Image: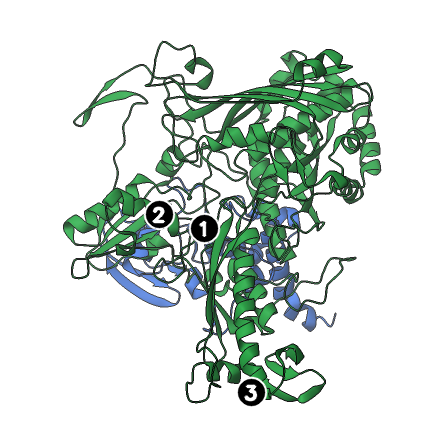
Amino acid sequence: MKTTVTVNGVPQTRDVEPRTLLIHFLRDALGLTGTHIGCDTSNCGACTVLWNRKAVKSCTILAAQADGGEITTIEGLAPDPAHLHPVQQAFWDEHGLQCGFCTPGMIMVSLDLLKRNPSPTDDEIRHGLDGNLCRCTGYQHIVNAIRTAAQRMRVPAVAAGGD
Amino acid sequence: MTIRPLAPGTRHDGSRWIGQPIARVEDRKFVRGAARYVDELTPPRTLHLAVVRSAHAHARVRRVDYDPLPAVADPQTARSSAVRLPDNEMLCWDRTAGDVEGAFRAAAAVVREHVSIPRLAPAPMETRGAGAAYDPGTDQLTVWVSAQDPHRPRTLLAQALGRPEERVRVITPDVGGGFGGNGHMPSEVILTALLAMRYVRPVKWIEDRTANLQTGYHGRGLAVDVEAAFAADRRLLAMRASFLADLGAYLYPPTPLMPITTAMLMTGTHHVPAAEARVVGVATNRSPTGPYRGAGRPEAALIAERVMDGGARALAIDPIEIRKRNVIPPDRIPFTTALGMRFDSGDYTPTLERLVSLMDLPRRREAQARARAAGRLSGIGIALYVEHAGARLWESAAVRVEPDGRVVVRRGSNSHGQGHHTVFAQVVAEVLRLDLTAVTIEQGDSAVVPRGVGTFGSRSMSTGAPAAFLAALRVKEKMSRIAARLLEASEDDLAWQDDRIAVRGAPDRGVPFAQVASIAYDAARLPAGLEMGLETTEYFRMTDPVFPFGAYGAIVDIDPETGVLKVEEIFAVDNAGRILNPWLAEGQVFGGIVQGFGEAVCEEFRYDEFGQPRTNTLADYAMPRAAEVPLLHGAFLETPSPNNPLGTKGIGEAGAIGTPAAIANAVADALHPIGNPHVQMPYTPEKLWRAIHFGKPGRP
């Protein structure tokens, strides 16, 4: 079935089987392989993307369900090849990754978390990661990364407030 | 480049790069989603391989049907079971040293402990996979595999396919973790390669998570009965233990090593004059076991440290004090233990003292007393560990300075998340006085890197980094010879500055690093009698393994109403010799701690009474999530190893080794006021609740 999804700002129309999962649409049809598959049961969160600006596990929805919607993947975050999104930069700066396999999902779920709660406590960050598994880091450096990203993303507001 | 401030009180030896907490140079691609794991590599015309597995634990294969047979479903019944696999006892290993019987007869107190450690799944976030392509024109087979290194898969593929190794090129692209589980090549990789050759088309195999959990080998799976004899002065006189290892249905090459390692290390950091270990490994209709992060050492630390806490209780002495009284003193090291481990270096008491200050232990004890008075089950656990690292004792690295002054390091060890691109660049840039960005690290391609061993057993810092260090030194010597001739000075009078080589005392007489490099490749300009090129390959060989050690602490609280265990904080003091990058080392420790936390608190790969696996997805196999993971605190002490020129040991497994023992002692401490009911890991709410409400008193 003909499906049109705006992915990272670009409308993409493909003929997909009705059973095609969004993750397979992204990886196989569009070649956006930054989003990973780590399990078959929606437990690991490696496949997290933004669907109409909310974090979803792209293995839990069909490509056809996203028809007419907007998807943001890890490849769509950086403003240009020379710069990174503040959350990407913070994961780098805070040693928030090791093997990197869970990282795209972690970054995407962090975006959703920080949009809902721009000043999360460490406990709120940890609960915000409840749908995402990491086997390498023990999470603490990921929490540091998200805290740092939150601080940096709040800076313009702070400056405007004359703090 | 991000450099984290050094921790307060940290001494720095003046090195520009070595020892500095530098953020990873390789991370741009990972945060951009531009990394390439094996599933990202799909050439045109790729065929996809799926593997169908038996539905029975034990059966006779009849085409696609089976004739089920009774299964050996658990190790306890394997020895007495009427069901005989070809040989239910696949491993017997005994060792005795000293007068064990005499020590037990003379003991003022005997401590007895039963310890059982469940099977665990390594469960890296990337499941295993491989791609293969065959070029009949050159008879070249290329295999991409999610492995911990290219060397072992290449050797095994060449053997399995009957091909010379140089006709098999193995590439490990980005690899999503391993933890030991990607060390042994699965047979599916051989199938993938065979099919690529048969069909002369690319073939790809990516396993699903259920296959990864079921058929990747498991770690641990060990039950131990241990006795320890203490003298009235609280010194440990002897230990004896019997081990029953659940090896699984058949042996992988490393399978027997884990219980033997545990047995040989069961005396831990303690001076134990007499010891006896009896290991039996049995066959079960389960997946084979193998090395999972820690690989025998977490089990050993658990045994040694449960015994030490038992001794402290029996002899009414503080857990810190009894350990200080029993550790091998630094002036006795190098030290060969009763069971045959030779510790290269160590100083255990300072790690305990640092742990006491890191935990603020007196204040913790006061808080515990208040919690207990309020009816809480509050526990504090302490554990020492010592581990064996540097397996196989050698590794390769090649350093080449290009004519433009850039440096390429090709190395046998292989990062699959550890951050080696940064650490190896630090080592080489330090020697050659360059910026980190001047160094490129290549790895994971058997056509590019020298023959090597790989990354496992916490070996890359003690064997691989010294190889790169020595290779860089030899290139530096070669460059010094060229620079000396150009500057008409003695080599001894040269001063290596940042990006420049000058004459000591005459700073204006110098030559840029890159100019020396370009002359090395220019026959017309290279002074006569000097060798062309700037490239050297070092095969570094250590004489003996190295023994990292440390002290861990855990604070726990058990809710008596629900049995829920909350691990509140974990403290780690690690001594892995010289630390090349404390930030990345901390990352290794923290990751290991949380795997050790999983082992103690929630992880267990389970089978039912028919041998059917029951924890087949990440919905059933409980890996720790961020919200339940405690706050972690780490500190390093540095006692350099004499066994390699950097003084390094290895930090990849430390966290997974010290943590289960510390949590086990904390849980026992928490349960002590209600009679020390006996519970085995993982400490699930159900087990703890049953123990609290119906438990029998533990031993002793």
Single out the mark in the foreground, 3 or 2.
3
Judge whether residue B602 can be spotted in this image.
Answer: no
Q: Is residue B3 left or right of residue B214?
A: right
- Check disc 1 and report its element: helix, strand or loop: loop
Quadrant containing the C terminus of chain B is: top right
Q: Residues within 10 Å of mark 3 (few under 14, many from 20)?
A: some
Q: Are marks 3 and 1 on the same chain?
A: yes
Quadrant containing the N terminus of chain B is: bottom right
Looking at the image, the residue that sits furthest to the front is B529
Q: Which residue is mark 3?
A: B486
* In front of the other: B542 or B560: B542
Image colour assigned to chain B: green
Q: What is the distance, in whole Å, between disc 3 and disc 2 at their CAs?
A: 46 Å
- The chain letter for the residue carrying disc 1 is B
* In front of the other: A82 or B173: B173
Q: Are marks 3 and 2 on the same chain?
A: yes
Q: What is the distance, in whole Å, between disc 2 and disc 1 at their CAs?
A: 10 Å
Q: Which residue is mark 2?
A: B153
Vertically, is A6 above or below B498?
Answer: above
Q: Residues within 10 Å of mark 2 (few under 14, many from 20)?
A: many
* In front of the other: B359 or B488: B488
Q: Is residue B71 left or right of residue B238?
A: left
Q: Which residue is mark 1?
A: B454
